Image (cartoon, rainbow, N blue to C red):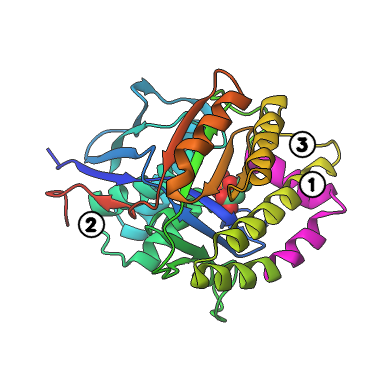
Amino acid sequence: MAPDHTAVAHPNIALVKYWGKRDEKLVIPNVDSLSMTLDVFPTVTTVRVTPGEPTDTVTFDGATAEGEQRLRITEFLDLVRKTAGRPERATVDTRNAVPTGAGLASSASGFAALAVAAAAAYGLDLDPTALSRLARRGSASAARSIFGDFAILYARRGDAADADLNSYAEPVPVPDFDPALVIAVVNAGPKAVSSRTAMRRTVETSPLYWPWARAGTTDLADMRAALNRGDLDAVGEIAERNAFGMHATMLAARPAVRYLSPATVAVLDGVLRLRADGVPAYATMDAGPNVKVLCHPADAARVAATMGEAAPGCTVVIARRGPGAALRSGDGP
Ligand code: DP6
């Protein structure tokens, strides 16, 4: 029997967001994005090549995967098989510590772990840049989870004729900045509109989309400078304006995409109260109602308590910078 290859990856939260693709098939973003990989909510994925089996077997959080969920994984394996020049099917077992599809970046950790485990199982010797390009094909944000700490995903870098080669992630060294990111899970259920559908609709119909995308260039340059200075207030202000702008593009889509719920707004009010009380705290939200708040580690417990009071019943988790995707020791090529 072929050996198991198990990889662990963590979600990342973008401080300058990706929203909208210029190539849907190759999963290439319209805009550069910059994120922090977390030390919570890992995905653990095991891949084993199964010679002689007619189909892939995919287990997701202990249950057989079906429909769209299964298709995204089997199509990803097809890409790995094509790259490796090997036809065998595989078994995939993937487990998320985070609610799947709730805007908590489970597709980022999921496809980063799958890319690392599947590449090893099929004997592909890929460097981190190539792994990030592979992970991107599953979900663009997954490219950033190949790396720990802070990472940038380029929409287009270099002038290779093959567009796929120009979109990849790389680490952003940030030596002197180690914030906390406090996550309020106000609703762990799956989102009503997938981010894939929502971003397509936004690009096609929102008059605010391209102004936001263009402003992202400034946000990214300002964010890099703020990270270099270790300036929490500047990092937070840029992250907030970029995230609110992204949600504004969605609200202006036709029909509108609205991920923010009353509980989201209550937590956002809590963040404003913290700032009024002199606690630096800044919010960001992705394709779901959950709120992530950037703050100094020394303030994290107070921030967490305020978020919990603002949205009674929500789960609050304090995250820090986390590691990049990796094979579990003993599973190397
Ligand atoms: C709002 O990476 O989940 O979290 O590439 O279609 O799989 P696909 O989308 P996905 O979108 C993430 C969007 C975001 C912002 C971000 O992570 O940059």
Does dot 2 land on a helix, a strand or a loop? loop
Does dot 3 land on a helix, a strand or a loop? loop
Report the residue at 67% width, 52% height from top: 240
Residue 248 tag number: 1
Disc 1: CA contacts within 10 A as few (<14), some (14-19) or many (>=20): some
Q: Position of residue 38 (x, y in %)?
A: 41, 48
Report the residue at 63% width, 53% height from top: 24
Which quadrant would residue 157 be assigned to in this image? Answer: bottom right
3 or 2: tag closer to the N-terminus: 2
2 or 1: tag closer to the N-terminus: 2
Q: Are marks 3 and 1 in contact (CB under 8 Å)?
A: no
Instruction: Please state if 192 lies on the left or on the right of 110 as rendered.
Output: right
Instruction: Please state if 106 lies on the left or on the right of 121 as rendered.
Output: right
Q: Residue furthest front?
A: 277
Q: Position of residue 204 (x, y in %)?
A: 81, 50
Question: Marks 3/1: CA distance?
Answer: 9 Å
Question: Can you see residue 18?
Answer: no
| Amino acid residing under circle 1 | Ala
Does dot 1 land on a helix, a strand or a loop? helix
| Amino acid residing under circle 2 | Gly
Name the residue tied to disc 2. 123
Instruction: Please state if 57 lies on the left or on the right of 302 as rendered.
Output: left
Q: Is residue 229 above or below residue 84?
A: below
